[in-house]
Amino acid sequence: MKTAVYPGSFDPVTNGHMEIIRRAAALFDRVVVLVASNAAKAGFFTAQERMDLLKLCTGTLPNVTVDATEGLVAHYTIEIAADVIVKGLRAMTDFEFEFQQALVNRQLNPRAETIFLPASGTSMYLSSGMVKQVCALGGDIGAFVPGEALPYIIEKISAKK
Ligand code: ADP
């Protein structure tokens, strides 16, 4: 039984994230989508909101669960005895940071291997930051986020304006 952890900010979930989740779910017996706190990124959605949206969007995937940690991803992978850390790569711009993270995570937990799944052409440009920006300026984000999450994302961003 192979368990993969897919960590990220998911602030909020996008179709790019969903694509990685679906592909990981086809590769591994169990996938835990992990909302991880990131000191470098102040969140817009609370950790609970991000988890709720992820749960809503992954409800039909039986081997996918959602969790959150305020600690290190590597420590979480030790706690649940995960085999793999899955990361998505959009462009070479993601690579340097992700590679560094992978090396640190291997140092902290040599048992968990990091694997990278390349984004598909249509997801290359998608980021949570872009979704928030387009939505805040009144643009249609329907093509960028899962339908289940769309009304909640629009509501929260509109309320902040
Ligand atoms: P961001 O805030 O930049 O959208 P996250 O921290 O939520 O990203 O990303 C979590 C993981 O998902 C990272 O490995 C990131 O590279 C990957 N990812 C994010 N967006 C996409 C996408 N559109 N396609 C593929 N992978 C992605």
Image (spheres, rainbow, N blue to C red):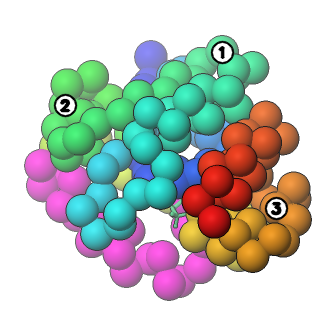
Say whether residue 10 is left or right of residue 126: left
| For the residues bearing labels 3 and 1, Cβ distance under 8 angstroms | no
Q: Is residue 147 magenta?
A: no
Q: Which residue position holds label 2?
A: 78
Disc nearer the start of the sequence (3/1): 1
**Residue 102 in view (yes/no):** no
- Ligand 1 visible in quadrant: bottom right
The residue depicted at 69 percent of the width and 69 percent of the height is: 136
**Alpha carbon separation for disc pair 1 and 2:** 23 Å
Say whether residue 86 is left or right of residue 102: right
Chain part drawn in magenta: 86-108
Question: How busy is the neighbourhood of tag 3: few (under 14 within 10 Å), some, or many (20 plus)?
Answer: many
* Disc 1, SS: loop
- Between disc 3 and disc 1, the foreground one is 3
Circle 2: residue type: Ile
Q: Which residue position holds label 1?
A: 62
Q: Which residue position holds label 3?
A: 141
Closest to the observer, 75 or 38: 38
Q: As displayed, is residue 111 above or below residue 107?
A: above
Disc nearer the start of the sequence (1/2): 1
Main secondary structure along the magenta-highlighted residues:
helix
